[in-house]
Image (tube, rainbow, N blue to C red):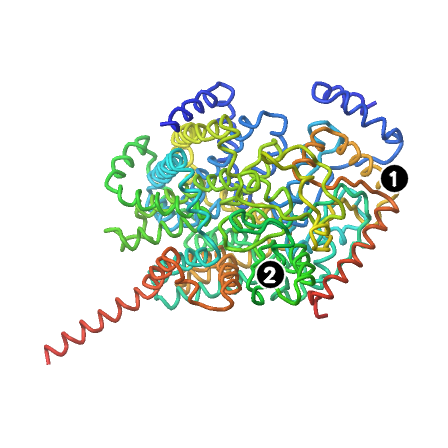
Amino acid sequence: MMIRSRMSKAKRIAGALAASACLIAPAWAQGWEPTKPVTLIIPAGTGGGADQMARFVQGIIQKHSLMKQPLIVINKAGGAGAEGFLEMKANASDPHKIAITLSNLFTTPLGTGSPFNWKDMKPVAMLALDQFVLWVNSDTPYKTAKEYIEAVKAGTDRQFKMGGTGSKQEDQIVTAAIERQTGGKKFTYVPYSGGGTVAVQLVGKHVDSTVNNPIEAVGQWRAGQLRPLCIFDAKRSTYTAKVTEKESWSDIPTCKESGLPVEYQMLRGIFTTKNATPAQVNFYVDLFKKVMATPDWQEFMEKGAFNQTFMSGADYEKWVTSAEAHHAGLMKEAGFLATQ
Amino acid sequence: MDELNALMGGFAVALSAYHIMLMVIGITLGVIIGVLPGLGGANGVAILLPLTFSMPPTSAIILLSSIYWGALFGGAITSILFNIPGEPWSVATTFDGHPMAQNGKADEALVGAFTSSFVGAIFAVCLITFLAPVVAKFALKFGPAEFFAVQFLTFASFIGMGRGSAFKTVASMCLGFALASVGLDGMTGTLRMTFGQDELLNGFKFLVAVIGLFGVGEILCSMEDGLKFNGATAKLRMDAVIRTWKQLPRMWLTFLRSCIVGCWMGITPGGATPASFMGYGIAKRLSKNGSNFGKGELEGVVAPETAAHAAGTSALLPMLTLGIPGSPTAAVLLGGLLIWGLQPGPLLFVEQPDFVWGLIASMYLGNVVGLIMVLTCVPLFAAILRVPFSIIAPAIVFICAVGAFTVNNAMFDVWMMLVFGVLGYLFNKLRYPLPPMVLALVLGDQAESSFRQAMLVSQGDVSVFWSNWLCGGIMTLGVVMAFWPALQMLRAKLAGNGAIARVA
């Protein structure tokens, strides 16, 4: 009954919508519910992709009154996110903690030797997959990924500079994967503190290329300062609305079709603490299904050209397991593993 | 004069009763956030961000930016009264602000700080209004080498600035560098000096150190001096504003210098904290009263406050035009823009003129409203000093502990704060200067990253720092500043020798 009264409050904004969301989750009322505020831990700093998504989720939950208890968002970015994950591990029996992940779920324990693994948490749901795009400055002559890779091959070793976020994290892993296709020529990888800075450094020509997420560089793309060469996904983006005057996200070819067989996507997923019961996990799965049913979420997805794949339960766990193996393979090959 | 027309349009948007009300609420909240150490502007804005999702973007940004102005104003209050910087950028305000309070001039220091904050902000807003496109292009010139040059200049302008020996300054700075390097090394992605302790993953956070070194350290010193605040007996006079304003016009050059330094640091983006340090350093070096700095000189409050506020305001420019945050608070606001459905970047000015000009107009109005609000409260703030020490000291320690906890939500930081408090006391007793250490803690890891990024780009060639006029000029200036005390000493020695030779 409580749910109803909550919904009537939100009716002005999204009554119909919340009702439809409720249909997806008929079992909600009989399951577990949080008895105190829920903490959403972001294992990254303020302003980044995970932070934006987490605060957006918080906003949606609040705006549509999707949960009785408040959701508190906390950044625990220390040690490339290890701080946040270790907190989840230490509170294994507190189901009022959830975490949003980025690739550091895999890369941080592998790269720094921090004592945790995703198995120290309980997978809830995959919200989306974040894309990576190969960008160059639009003043450069490279129109396709093939042309750019040819130029790298023809240049001297380490002549081309790749800007990225963090060290031994996703951007550098993608860079290492590209280097397998450049005939032994390496990039000089320059790590910066945030994706926005990386995009601006490319506009200022302090680096030659980046593998920014779409949302980090879309502003510069629309202003004609940056040019996307290819997207590191198996198939093209499904968003066909025009982003610039002429192009949409779906016009960016995949890297594979432009002769650069590299695929990489980043998990934006939710985990809760290890000892959570199935009823507790289900509560969060339903909560995020409702979040994802809102038009706000759809808009956010399109703006950031996210790959909208939802998974939960066994599928999700399987995906995470294979992603971990994938990262371990890539990082081992690139020599990024902690020497422990 | 397109800008003027657009700005007038912006005023039309911002000047509604609803928006003025939002400004008043925002500034009040901001001042409270600014006063509480640890709960910085960035945290405050992040906490309140979700509340704004159902508002129109313009109203939301007016509320949030008002919180930001309030925090910029509020940071000065505790710095002056209790030597506890409420915000990182008010550390430099303590250098002269607190001695002024001890001399019984707390009200003048507060009025000076608020007024100069206002001047700095208005200067920066004018810059944003008329020069946004040009300035945005300038920011693009900054690569790793240029960033390092700026950071180097900040450090260099500090060496030999302290009252004591230059060696003590360097020693204090080196300790700061060592503390700053704990945690994750962003360049190689490996952990440094954590000794397997999970608590050290996060490194030593600047705010925790500052709360301990200044706040707790100061309380320890006061306890030794006899459990009372110096200057508490000064009479409360209501004419503080007029009294202080009379003194300000002759400091016009300091205002101008700090405005320029502040805008430059905000845009590049160095941020308000280095700007305040640099503003103070330059004023001390160039002002006629420079030798009195640190003993309670009004000019020593004006210089860092003007620079900090100019930087804090102009930091919004790269956020709006380039999509890069010039400060942590700007980073959170940037996230907000995306959530409200606005795409920061070069096209924001073209596509969302109502929003951008509404925001700029609210910067003018927000600062005017803020100044009036804080100035009327000056006697109230100054009266806090009249509360007996034995009542207020425990309250301060309590607030400091809460603040240290808030930084990372970690109990470990509260213990660290106490350790830093003892360290601050020892530094005070041994006459080692604290500011260089604090500066190294703030800027140390950034400077290290920039240096190593530049080295990666140039393949280890140091001449990259002199590869163009911009970076080379700043570096050369930095080198001159760094060796200035040595040169002066040498000159004095030579002159001395000459005199002796003549006598002989």
Left or right of B238 in this view: A219:
right
Whether residue B206 sits left or right of residue A317 in the image: it is left
Q: Which amino acid type is shown beneath numbered disc 2?
A: Val
Q: Which residue is mark 1?
A: A279
Q: Does residue B107 appear in this view?
A: no
Observer-nearest of A319 and B331: A319
Residue B297 visible here? yes
| Pick the front one: A125 or A174 | A174
Residue at coordinates 50% horizontally, 69% vertically from top-left? B460
User: Does label 1 or label 2 sit earlier along the sequence?
Assistant: 2
Residue at the left extreme, as displayed? B503
Q: Quadrant of residue B377?
A: top left
| Residue drawn 86% across the image and 51% down it | A318
Secondary element type, mark 2: helix
Residue B404 locus on image (x, y percent)? 57, 49
- The residue positioned 58% from the left and 25% from the top of the image is B56
Same chain under badges 1 and 2? The reply is: yes
Q: Residues within 10 Å of mark 1 (few under 14, many from 20)?
A: some
Q: Position of residue A122 (x, y in %)?
A: 82, 48
* The quadrant where residue B48 appears: top right
**Tag 1 secondary structure:** helix
Is B305 rendered above or below residue B56? below
For the residues labelled 1 and 2, the Cα–Cα distance comes to 53 Å
Say above or below: B233 vs A20.
below
| On-image quarter of the C terminus of chain B | bottom left
Q: Chain of mark 2?
A: A
Front-most of residues A318 and B164 = A318
Relative to A284, B411 lies left or right: left
**Which residue is the site of mark 2?**
A152
What's under tag 1, amino acid-wise? Ala
Which image quadrant: the N terminus of chain B?
Answer: top left
